[in-house]
Image (tube, rainbow, N blue to C red):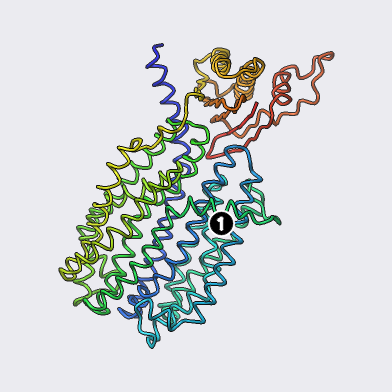
Amino acid sequence: MTEHAAEKKIWNRSVYFVSGAFRRFYIPTLLSSFWLAVAGVADSVFVGNGIGSAGLAAISFGQPVYLFYNILSYGFSIGGSIHYASKLAEGRAEEGNRIFLTVWKMLLMIYVLTALLGLLFLPQLMQLLGADPSDPVTKTYIRTQLIFIPVMFSQGPFYFFVNADNGQKTAAAAMSVSGISDALFSYIFVIRMNLGVAGSVYSTVVGAILMLAITGRHIAAKRGALRFKSEKMDWRSAAVSGRTGFATSVQYLFQFSTMIMVNHLLVRLGGAPAVAAFDVVYNISLLCISVTEGAVVASEPMISSYRSERNLANIEITLRLALFWSAVLSGIFTVLLLVFSPFFSMAFGMREGIGLAYSSEGIRIYAISILPAMLNVLFSGYYQAVFKESLAYLITILRTFVFYVIALLVCSGYGMTGFWFLFVVSEILSMMVWLPLAACKGGILQLKDIDVSNTLSVVVDSSSQDISKISKQMQEFCEERLSDPKIPMYIGLTVEEICCAVLERFRDQMGKIYIQVTAVAENDGVTLYLRDNVLEFNPLGENTEGISLQEGKLLELVGLRIVQKKAKEFYYRRYAGFNTLVIRM
């Protein structure tokens, strides 16, 4: 087999592993992101139909409150979960769990303190948001929001950490239940029980409680590495989590400030109907971008893990998959909104008059920005996962603040029609800046600074490949890079014994088993990352205590016994449908 053919075969087997993992992550996270967006849309739909434009305007005025807490929740939760996934990939579960507990406890304290301040200075807060302090509908909505902030925004750390804890199905189910319950109870509280705008908040609280119960059970039942336990706060990990995660959540900081600007501006441009129309377009934008955010949430822990392994091929495959499915689904949304914009407007209760005209036109123009926004959001999450936070920050700052504000000021000068083009202008200008900049500074993928000279990745195909050939290849690779002659010998032995143990245990599946082996040599030692597609099985978990050379008992486990003794440490977990094993020699 030629070198090119061998590389192609390894690439194809890598696609097998990555696509399987991505599928297990993306479908659940897509559903959870979509249902979360649906919950927000449902609130506006029922409020619009039950109360009218005054209710939609109240939701728009109160939106910055949610955005402020999204800054905190998403920032620390996403960043923390990325580092948590990286710690698990390195076999450091205790350090990862400490990150989770620190982030969760710290956020709770901030939530309670800031919500109390908001309630204490409610009239001043309403003025800041652009609302009339004497408006009873808006006052009720914002007050109810603040009371339940600690419950609603505890969902962030639980969702992202459980998702990274090999609990993607649990996290997705929990968020889907939260979204569906929110939509259902919004109808019950707002339409059937006539609780007004406060009912839309109550429905969100019900969904949050159910979500926390489901994800909390995952932790309490010890289904992953997360644990509820008494831990000292690790403020350094909180700072590192915030630095990584704020590349995503900083968009909410900018949206917080720009939303206030938008509310003040729309009141002057078209009054309450214009504010209500913006709430319609804004909610539809959340629904459209949810497919990309699902891809980001799915790919971030995978990319973070592959980066720890220095497996550039797996990173590239993951990004391709995320890009493909985001583009397909975003394209579908674009067509639907362009063709059926009046029907979407009427679903929010905007059935006639200037409100229908404003929102229908806004939806059509917004649709043009969906694909550029998809690209911006996806690469912002990607750069965050490969720890290129500066590029992630740049994309977010450009699209949610710099160009957004410029477009807002310029486009609003052309009336309501011009105003809606702010979405299109801000996304396209942002893309025109960061794409060439990234290409000039290390390439679009930004992987050139990852040293792969001391990394070797191969895939064992049970239908054709000789295990001894692979183990010899690994041994020779280590001999070239390490001064200690014993380590390469143990590496060869380890690879051969682990692979043989897997093939022997599942010999009835011979021809269908693939084992990906990656060796990283550094600091005069080697870390092995092994991934296979068989049922749950940990070769180093085998009981080798009963081996007897004299009696000839369990002689087939002698090699595994040597590996257990010679390994500095090893860590096994079932992750994304595959067995993963990290061994340090």
Question: Where is residue 229 shown, x and y percent of the image?
Answer: 70, 55
Frontmost residue, 480 versus 309: 480
Vertical arrangement, residue 127 with respect to residue 510, above or below: below
Quarter of the figure with residue 35: bottom left
Give the residue displayed 42% in from the left and 21% down from the top. Answer: 9
Q: Quadrant of residue 494?
A: top right
Query: Is 142 on the left-hand or right-hand side of 344?
Result: right
Q: Is residue 247 left or right of residue 347?
A: right
Count of labels in the image: 1
**In this rendering, is residue 486 above or below 329?**
above
Kindly identify the residue that appears in the image at 38 percent across and 42 percent down: 322
Residue 512 in view (yes/no): no
Residue 543 lies, with reference to residue 169, above or below; the image says above
Furthest toward the bottom, the residue is 134
Percent x, y for residue 40?
40, 66
Q: Residue furthest left?
A: 414
**Residue designated by label 1:** 158
- Three-letter residue code for mark 1: Phe
Instruction: Confirm whether residue 149 shows in the render.
Output: yes
How many neighbours does mark 1 have within 10 angstroms: few (below 14), some (14-19), or many (20 or more)? many
